[in-house]
Amino acid sequence: MGRNIITIEDPVEYQISGVTQLQVQQRSGLTFATGLRSMLRADPDVIMVAEIRDADTARMSRLLTGHLVLSPLHTNDAASAITRLTEMGVEPFLTASALDRVVAQRLARTLCVHCKAPHVLSADYLEKVGYPVGVDLEVYEPKDAPAAPTPATRAASASTR
């Protein structure tokens, strides 16, 4: 038997097979906090909250002891997550007992196939700048490309730390 995974989102962007997904319905009273309360009845293994936007949702998330709760929290860096939760009204001792880990995500520029030109970084250069990998590395630099669907520096992908 697989894991019981439940999400609450606003809106549900992708249907995922095997995952129970709830969509926030403000008019009918289904908020992130009320959705979390109803999720507990299903005894899920994993709860995914699309966003912790307010103190009620943050407080409900901390009550989910024994459950893995995953949620983004908008801050400038990982360390600021604790401060943000405190600003939202979650007591620091509760945050300390409930928070397991924080991962920071940054957007990094990506280059489409039309917008990149290969460039080789020598092993000597890499060692000189503090990366002693022992081999030459091929990297890519942006270049102008009229056939590109978007400008080279507009596309981005996420990386985590």
Image (cartoon, rainbow, N blue to C red):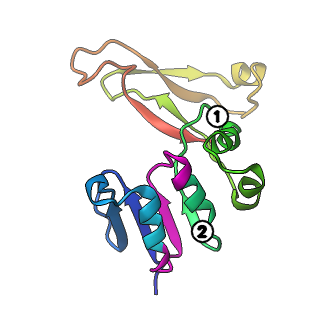
Q: Which mark is residue 136?
A: none
Place of residue 114 in the rendered image (x, y in percent of width and height, measured from the top left)? 30, 24
Compared with 28, 102 (above or below) is: above
2 or 1: tag closer to the N-terminus: 2
Quarter where residue 112 is shown: top left
Quarter where residue 34 is shown: bottom left
The region drawn magenta spans 40-56
* Distance from the alpha carbon under mark 2 to that under mark 1: 24 Å
Quarter where residue 130 is shown: top right
Mark 1: amino acid:
Asp
Which residue position holds label 1? 77
Which residue is at the far bottom?
1
Place of residue 102 in the rendered image (x, y in percent of width and height, measured from the top left)? 66, 48
Residue at screen point 31% across, 18% down: 151
Residue at screen point 50% across, 75% down: 40
- Image depth: mark 2 or mark 1 in front: 2
The magenta stretch spans residue 12: no
**Horizontal relation, residue 61 to residue 21: left or right:** right
**Horizontal relation, residue 94 to residue 150: left or right:** right
Compared with 20, 150 (above or below) is: above
Residue at screen point 72% across, 51% down: 91
- Element type at marker 2? loop
Mark 2: amino acid:
Leu
- Local crowd size for mark 2, using a 10 Å CA cut-off: few (<14), some (14–19), many (≥20): some
